[in-house]
Amino acid sequence: MANKIPRVAVREQDARLRATNFEEVCYGYNSEEAILEASRCLGCKNPRCVAACPVGIDIPAFIHKVLESDFAGAASIIAADSSLPSICGRVCPQETQCEGSCIVGIKSEPVAIGKLERFVGDWSLENGAADAAIAEPNGHKVAVIGSGPAGLACASDLAKWGYDVTIFEALHKVGGVLVYGIPEFRLPKEKIVAREIGKLKDLGVKFECDVIVGRTITIDALFEQEGFDAVFIGSGAGLPRFMGIEGENLNGVVSANEFLTRANLMRAYDQTYDTPIYVGKRVVVVGGGNVAMDAVRTAKRLGAEATIVYRRSEAELPARQEEVHHAKEEGIEFRMLTNPTRVIGDDRGWVKAISCVRMELGEPDESGRRSPVVVEGSDFEVECDVVIMALGTSPNPLLKQTTRGLETNRRGCIVADDNGATTREGVFAGGDAVTGAATVILAMGAGRKAAKAIDAYIKEKRA
């Protein structure tokens, strides 16, 4: 039976070597490996993997095309539901979504759906496979705020349906978190992100960079002066959180957002770029999510001894298992059940250590995870030169402050219904701006839902 075939392993760069460079860790499948892995799919009549995919890709259908060596056909099937397959195949948490629902995974390892999607996406980029059909222009304009995954997904669908779409990006380069947040070794920027975004440009999507909506122009002005029929907010959640402990204002304490932006978007890791970035000899990253893994692995590559400090056990780490595994292979130290209480500085106002306490797990909290409890008298210090806080993010309050009728909740997230409609007529929102920090694929799913709602809204107004 097909599910008796072992899962095809993915070739990777040697851990000792990759810990010193920013080249991609995983090499992905070649065509022979992809076809062999595709043969493991059972082609279920009621595929649970499709239901678990936030953008609803017809997974068995595209995998069947791979099995037949019809890679262009596979690319066309994926393109009907996803505009960023090479990206999603690399960074989405398939183990908790499509692969986590795979029937083959009950008695064996699940089909490597993400790696197959990556293969097809990369093949499409190299061979120029045709994208989904594009409708004739319908004469209606939609503004998209933010060029991250939610904005790109929304813009892609609307452009295919004939809308005149303009994406407004606050930074000088498009891609949102895809370019400033995810390291090069996980997601190559020129090889993958720029080319995926190029496909949107081919659809006719326009991009305007260095535009801060709420400062450079307001949402009200987009309607009243620029003539847009609807606006989608996909501005993400870029406002970092801190612990509120003593010493967080010392030199050498930074947010993961700032650290990764300098390293990724501003290419601080590249010695030919004049972008300062300081790691010293020892870096401590506080947090256990994917952003924490990205930050600590980046610090390692920049030459520091790098340590993760996390207040729960390894079983509760929210980061992808693959990223934790790669981090350990690269020599990252993990200090579990450890919580910082104070950042200690030297006479010059620079970090020299972080004071911590041991934790133990108590009763489950509202999320279902066991709450960490301080072990009394367990204080100790960890010497370090830099502390990176990777504790999550919140949406920027600027749009709420500058837009009439736009409501946010107590966490600062924009209030929107399941289809992305906000409390302001004609304004829709999705992704991290609505949910708080989440995943690329969930943001894309929200963007696609909002695109359908925008299409229905404009057609209703036109009727």
Image (cartoon, rainbow, N blue to C red):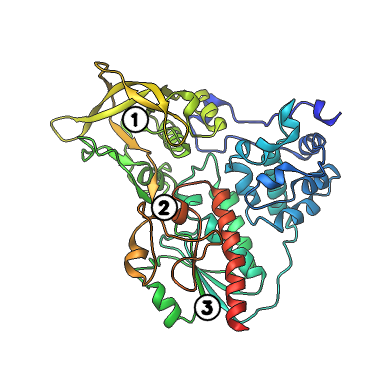
Q: Residue at x 71, y 32 (%)?
A: 110
- Amino acid under label 1? Val
Element on which disc 3 rests = loop
> Disc 1 designates what residue?
283
Q: CA distance from mark 1 to mark 3?
A: 48 Å
Q: CA distance from mark 2 to mark 3?
A: 25 Å
User: Is there any visible trace of residue 286 in the rendered image?
Assistant: yes
Are the two marked residues, 2 and 1, in contact with CB atoms closer than 8 angstroms? Answer: no
Element on which disc 2 rests = loop
User: Is there any visible trace of residue 215 in the rendered image?
Assistant: no
* Relative image position of residue 333 (x, y in whole percent): 42, 22
Q: Earlier in the sequence, mark 2 or mark 3?
A: 3
Q: Residue at x 13, y 31 (%)?
A: 347
Q: Which mark is residue 229?
A: 3
- Amino acid under label 2? Ala
When the figure is inspected, residue 374 is found, relative to residue 198, above or below; the finding is above
Q: Nearer the viewer, residue 57 or 254?
A: 57
* Relative image position of residue 181 (x, y in whole percent): 45, 46
> Disc 2 designates what residue?
237
- Amino acid under label 3? Asp
When the figure is inspected, residue 365 is found, relative to residue 145, above or below; the finding is above
